[in-house]
Image (cartoon, helix red, strand yellow):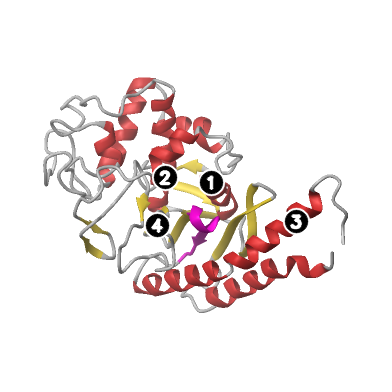
């Protein structure tokens, strides 16, 4: 087989670099993860993948996975009402993870909560809700949440440089290469229980109205237990070409991660430029370019699989 077998990956890396060069932070880093030989791995990239980045609200994906692993292991209950000393009346762990607890974005302290709705009635994106979920499992396990995240999710996935520095809602620090490992696991789980990843990405209480930060009110603001689900939203930070079941998260630090299983692709971006108007056009444009490569990358995967199948003659 000629060297042209890698051309789709090289071409996509060049395309990514051209997009990033137009961003406010031309030193941003990007990784595309695809499926090759039955497993997830990076297929194209641009920028420094080893520099530490602050991932802001992308943190919520790892926080939710940590909680969901504990639920899977029987150490926490998604549907048991939490004590009113730590959560709004009637709220459960699932309400906290899918942003339907009623807590405001920054809701204050227990006893003086700013509560905007009864649990399960509206999608109100809440940093406080995620922090309460983390605090709850800390109490249950008697272990610091940063340790739980590291031992239950980051270390098993090989994310050896990932650490939680502060809030469980937005304190993640990690190189882009580590987040590519997470994206690969969400695309094709091999380490985490499939049920855990499914809970993260499957719409919970679908059809609720809510505000998507940076993009305004959405009639169907769907979320799983930790991940945003694209559905039919417009405008949106992914591409109109992304499958409706695409899931992920973005952060105010200029970071994003989406997983599109229908196209067998995931995209991770990191920038030093905070989220703003630039991202509302740059991210969808990059996503569209990546999705345009899906057919070529699929062909590349098939060619490589053929070459590595025992008994198959190489060209």
Between marks 2 and 3 in the image, the one whose residue lies nearer the viewer: 3
Task: Say whether disc 2 or disc 3 marks the residue closer to the N-terminus.
Answer: 2
**Residue visible at 58% across and 44% down in the picture:** 161
Q: CA distance from mark 2 to mark 3?
A: 31 Å
Count residues near mark 4 (Cα–Cα under 10 Å), then give few for <14, some for 14-19, many for 20+.
many
Instruction: Give the distance between the C-alpha atoms of the residues marked 1 and 4, in whole angstroms.
Output: 14 Å
The answer to whether 267 is drawn above or below residue 19 in the figure is above
On screen, residue 117 versus residue 142, left or right, reads: left
Residue 211 lies in the magenta stretch: no
Residue that numbered label 4 is attached to: 250
Q: Which residues are magenta?
A: 260-272
Residue 204 locus on image (x, y percent): 29, 42
- Looking at the rendered image, the quarter that the C terminus falls into is bottom right
Indicate the quadrant where residue 30 lies. bottom right
Say if mark 2 contacts mark 3, CB within 8 Å. Answer: no
Residue 269 spot, x, y in % from top left? 50, 61
Q: Earlier in the sequence, mark 1 or mark 4?
A: 1
| Disc on res. 61 | 2
91, 275: nearer the viewer: 91
Drawn side of residue 116 relative to residue 266, left or right: left
Query: In this figure, which residue is indicated by the disc labeled 3?
Result: 304
Quarter residue 10 falls in? bottom right
Q: Residues within 10 Å of mark 1 (few under 14, many from 20)?
A: many
The Cα atoms of the two marked residues, 2 and 1, are separated by: 9 Å
- What residue is shown at x 25% (from left), y 50% (from top)? 125
Q: Which mark is residue 182?
A: 1
């Amino acid at each position: 087989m000629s060297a042209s077998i890698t051309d789709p990956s090289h071409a996509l890396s060049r395309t990514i670099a051209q997009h990033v060069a137009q961003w406010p932070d031309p030193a941003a880093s990007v990784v595309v993860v695809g499926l090759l030989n039955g497993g997830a791995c990076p297929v194209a990239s641009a920028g420094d993948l080893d520099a530490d980045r602050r991932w802001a609200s992308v943190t919520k994906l790892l926080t939710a996975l940590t909680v969901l692993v504990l639920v899977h292991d029987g150490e926490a209950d998604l549907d048991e009402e939490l004590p009113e000393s730590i959560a709004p009346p009637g709220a459960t762990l699932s309400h906290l993870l899918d942003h339907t607890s009623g807590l405001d974005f920054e809701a204050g302290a227990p006893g003086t909560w700013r509560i905007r709705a009864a649990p399960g009635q509206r999608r109100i994106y809440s940093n406080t809700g995620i922090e309460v979920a983390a605090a709850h499992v800390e109490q249950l396990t008697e272990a610091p949440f940063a340790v739980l995240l590291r031992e239950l999710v980051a270390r098993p996935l090989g994310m050896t440089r990932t650490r939680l520095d502060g809030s469980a809602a937005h304190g993640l620090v990690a190189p882009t290469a580590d987040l590519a490992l997470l994206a690969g696991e969400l695309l094709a789980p091999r380490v985490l229980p499939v049920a855990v990843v499914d809970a993260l990405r499957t719409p919970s209480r679908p059809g609720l109205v809510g505000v998507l930060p940076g993009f305004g009110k959405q009639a169907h603001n769907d979320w799983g237990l930790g991940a945003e689900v694209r559905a039919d939203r417009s405008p949106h930070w992914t591409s109109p070409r992304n499958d409706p079941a695409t899931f992920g998260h973005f952060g105010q630090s200029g970071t994003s991660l989406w997983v599109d299983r229908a196209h067998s692709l995931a995209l991770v971006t990191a920038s030093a430029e905070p989220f703003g108007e630039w991202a509302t056009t740059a991210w969808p444009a990059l996503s569209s370019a990546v999705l345009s490569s899906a057919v070529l990358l699929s062909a590349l995967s098939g060619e490589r699989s053929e070459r590595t199948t025992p008994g198959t003659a190489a060209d």
